Amino acid sequence: MSRASNDTPLFPWDICQEIIEAFWWSSISNHDRVEFMLSSSLVSKTWRKLYTIVSFRDMHIPTPNYGLNMMHLGSLYNFIHDPAMNDMPAQMCRTITFHIQSSNLLENFPEENDECEMGRCATVTLYTLSNFANLLPNLRRVRFEYVNYPLTDVFHNLRLYFIPPQVDAIDLRYRFDSMVKPEIVSELRQEEDMRHYATWALANVKELTLIGGSRAVTREILRRTTNLRKLTVDEHGRVWDIPKGLLDTSKCRVVRI
């Protein structure tokens, strides 16, 4: 039996797209995500084109180098040889996800994370996009996915201080794997007054998602999102003293995981 040509997909294109999107949004390590990004250019032409569309539409930044290259809008995807696709990132990008992971929570307290490479990458990237909004004019959502990281990093290191004006949705997601003892996670989620952190506002944000955080994180973020229209939290961040405008269940949604 002859081998399939490089541009002949083994699966229908819609099945390939479902596989790519399922993996793209799965909870995997930064190492596995980078491996997937690099290998997706080698599967087939069909797979490569579908991956390009998915990755341009919803960008994931797993390492500082990817954030740096994203500023050039295309150099990250230099395996593309079709000049017509050069403008795709600017036109298609609607979401950026920053993956900030640590293997040891105890070595990463907020005071020590100010110069964390991925944290600094997120800050610099958002600062650049907030000053040059035309780079990604259709960007609407910014996501932070923390793994084994302090809940207060987003406040202590002002991760959301520079949000591009066109962004109207923020996602904060926290996850702790088996390397972190449950009692440590429970301690992190204890009630804490966070009002001593520097004041900054998210005036343009209309939609907020908080998963895996704490009630203290929810309260502090709500203090800064004065024009919020939709709130999604899980059981860890569920609070009762939410703004009156969100009491309508059509605007405030609580999810359980």
Image (cartoon, rainbow, N blue to C red):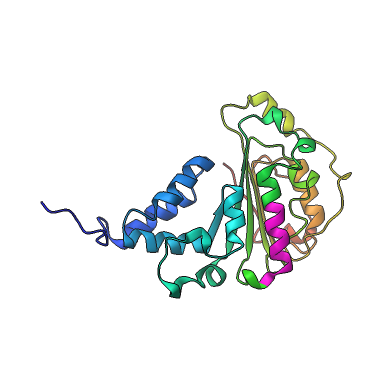
Q: Is residue 220 visible?
A: yes
Toward the bottom, the furthest residue is 84
Q: Residue at x 56, y 27 (%)?
A: 178
Instruction: Tell whether position 192 is magenta.
Output: no
Q: Viewed as shown, does residue 211 lie left or right of 77?
A: right
Q: Viewed as shown, does residue 37 lie left or right of 228?
A: left
User: Residue 241: percent from the left, percent from the top?
Assistant: 80, 49
Task: Using the image as rendered, state which of residue 102 and residue 67 is in the foreground.
Answer: 67
Q: Residue at x 40, y 67 (%)?
A: 81
Toward the right, the furthest residue is 196
Toward the left, the furthest residue is 1
Task: Using the image as rendered, state which of residue 38 and residue 187 is in the foreground.
Answer: 38
User: Residue 66: percent from the left, percent from the top?
Assistant: 57, 53
Give the main secondary structure of the magenta stretch: helix
User: Residue 18: percent from the left, percent from the top?
Assistant: 38, 56
User: Residue 213: percent from the left, percent from the top?
Assistant: 68, 41
Magenta region: which residues? 122-133
Q: Residue at x 74, y 42 (%)?
A: 115
Q: In what quadrant of the picture does the C terminus appear?
A: top right
